[in-house]
Image (cartoon, rainbow, N blue to C red):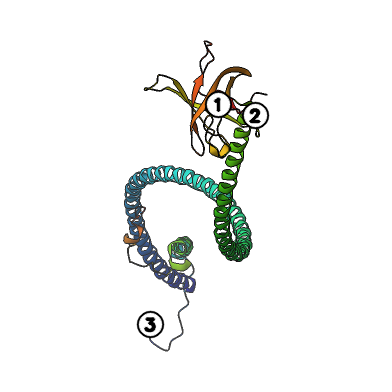
Amino acid sequence: MQMPGGRARRGGSPDVYTAMAFAAVVFLATACVFVYLAASKVGKDGNAFGLQDATQPNAAGISLKAGR
Amino acid sequence: MHILTKVLVITAAVLSVFLAALTIAYSTNAERIVSQFQAERNLKVAALGALDAAKGQAGEEQARLNAQIEKLYGDLATRTADFNRLEAGITTLQGEKAKALADYQSLQAKIAELGETAKTQANLITSYRDEVTTLRKNELTYRQQALEMDDRLSDLESQREVLEQTVRALQEQLAEARTQQETLVQGGPGAVSATGLKSAEPFVSSGPLVAGRVESVSKDAATGALLAKINLGSNDLVRENQKLFVGRGGEFVANVVVLKTDLKWSIARIDTLGRAVEVREGDQVLSRLQ
């Protein structure tokens, strides 16, 4: 058992988990970028985090009046 | 665990959170956009349906409007024709108006001229009236003078007749005296004294030549002798028992002997001297043969 006040243990060396984490970060970053770009396209005013209005378009203004 | 691994894990966790947020936002926006898109599509369909209905109505309205336009074109053509006709009428009326104005001015001039003429004639009439008044006054004066002259003339006529009667009486006395003188000179039967009665033999007047006409020829019922009325009387110095001569066309016809005299006519007995002649109305009668 490691008691407090002793010397710090030395950290481990990068292993496969590090590589996997690195790959996960890379893929996550890539995914964030792609999603960010896509979200920017669909986001309100080009903001990726902006939400569109939930109101439905009004059909009343679209009624075509017959000529007089 | 290596520090790098920790860093990577933390980074991965942060990126996961970030990714989750982005995914949430993206999915929400995508869902909303899809619903809005669907709604828009529905609206589009409804709008297309409304558009078709509107097109149908517009077509009908257009047809109605076209018909109305045609009708209006027809009315416009009619109005245009009426307008042209009225313009022509206006032109004609303007011409007639100009002509009427000219006639009016001409009539005004004529009226003025006639007015002047009337004034002149009024002046003439006034002068004629004055002249006629003067003439009438003069005529009255002349008539009065004429009446006075007629009265004077009547008086003179009366005097003249009296004098003529006196002259005639004196002439008759003179003719009687001459007849008696001639009878005395001839010495025939029936001679009378100078105091004068009519001689039995007809005598021919030696006085001035007297000419007349036979007015009528009749037969005496008592004696059956032919009698002639001649237009010579005592005013013409014809006396009873005077012989006159009847001629026709310059030829001697018969003798007539005066039986009765009046002032302007006489009755004489026709003596044809045994010839087959006839005394007619209008035959000339002379106191002696020329």
Under tag 2, what secondary structure?
helix
Q: Among all residues in the image, which is located at the extreme right?
A: B290
Taking depth in this image into account, of B268 and A31 the one nearest to the observer is B268
Residues behind callouts 1 and 2 on a single chain: yes
Query: Residue B110, how many percent across, how many down?
Result: 61, 56
Chain identifier of the residue bearing label 3 in the image: A
Q: Residues under labels 1 and 2: Cα distance?
A: 15 Å
Query: Residue B47, how many percent across, how many down?
Result: 34, 52
Asked whether the viewer can see residue B289, the reply is yes
Q: Residues under labels 3 and 1: Cα distance?
A: 239 Å
Judge depth for marks 2 and 3 and give the one in front: 2
Chain identifier of the residue bearing label 2 in the image: B
Asked whether the viewer can see residue A47, the reply is no
Q: Quadrant of the N terminus of chain B?
A: bottom left
Q: Amino acid at mark 1?
A: Pro
Query: Residue A65, how many percent across, how many down?
Result: 34, 55
Chain identifier of the residue bearing label 1 in the image: B
Residue B202 is marked as 1
Can you identify the residue that label 2 sits on? Answer: B185
Residue A2 is marked as 3
Q: Quadrant of the C terminus of chain B?
A: top right
